Amino acid sequence: MKSLSNTEWSYFPALISHNQTGYWKNIILENLEWTQPVVKVYSKRYSVPRLTAFLGSKGISYKYSGAIHYAEDWPKWFFPLLDYIRDFSRTNYNGCLINLYRDGNDCMGWHSDNEKELDPKKSIASLSLGATRDFFFRSLIDSSSNNIELRDGDLLLMHPECQFNWKHCLPKRKKVSEVRINLTFRCYR
Ligand SMILES: O=C(O)CCC(=O)C(=O)O
Ligand SMILES: [Fe+2]
């Protein structure tokens, strides 16, 4: 089942051209400090199956691995991409969580992005670079689901209700051998 747009999300295939995605993929891979957060689930600790990095306006706080981190400030090289996504989405995002899926074994489990530190009235813009991966939505209201194939350069705008009414995930895909980078532009309080 495929859905391009509804009231809860909007999907813009190939918003960014292949030339540009190659440039951004390389510069992001080279310039960011990647970590593999450890999370605690029922007193057991395990490393998340992906690498992450975070960028944001100076001083905004975000949480991962149970600890609060403070952003330094946006690096200069990031502004052309940040400004483009801010203009396109008409939202002044002040943080960006970046996930690096090294291959199809890396993934993200079912969740909603409804953390307390996020402004629940603002959208989240999710930009994909690199390998094509399936992305699933599952309704929290009824039994409906949706499946989007996210490709290089695609933008998925998740409107505020999306985080209340749906969960989403990026399942493992053993046959995928290429890297994928996903950037989620967010509004922190
Ligand atoms: O990699 C993706 O497409 C999804 C990432 C995501 O859901 C998140 O960072 O919250
Ligand atoms: Fe998410």
Image (cartoon, rainbow, N blue to C red):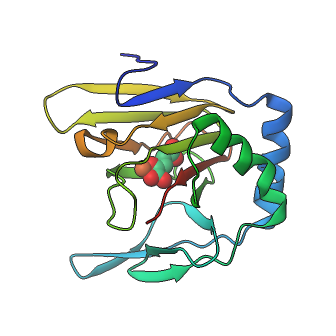
Residue 71 located left or right of residue 16: left
Q: In which quarter of the image is residue 113?
A: bottom left
Give the percent coordinates (x, y) of residue 32.
Answer: 74, 67
Number of dots carrying numbers: 0
Q: Is residue 179 above or below residue 62?
A: above
Residue 178 located left or right of residue 69: right
Give the percent coordinates (x, y) of residue 101.
Answer: 59, 52
- In front of the other: 43 or 189: 189
Residue, far left: 142
Quadrant containing the N terminus is top left
Residue at the spot 43% in from the left edge and 83% down from the top edge: 67
Residue at the spot 21% in from the left edge and 76% down from the top edge: 42
Residue at the spot 58% in from the left edge and 64% down from the top edge: 51
Q: Is residue 77 above or below residue 85?
A: below
Q: In this view, does 120 lie above or below 30?
A: above
Quadrant containing the C terminus is bottom left
Give the percent coordinates (x, y) of residue 96.
Answer: 59, 58
Residue 110 located left or right of residue 70: left
Residue at the spot 38% in from the left edge and 80% down from the top edge: 66
- In front of the other: 119 or 5: 119
Asked whether residue 130 is in view, the answer is: no
Q: Quadrant of residue 15?
A: top right
Give the percent coordinates (x, y) of residue 5.
Answer: 43, 20
Asked whether residue 94 is in view, the answer is: yes
- In front of the other: 101 or 86: 86
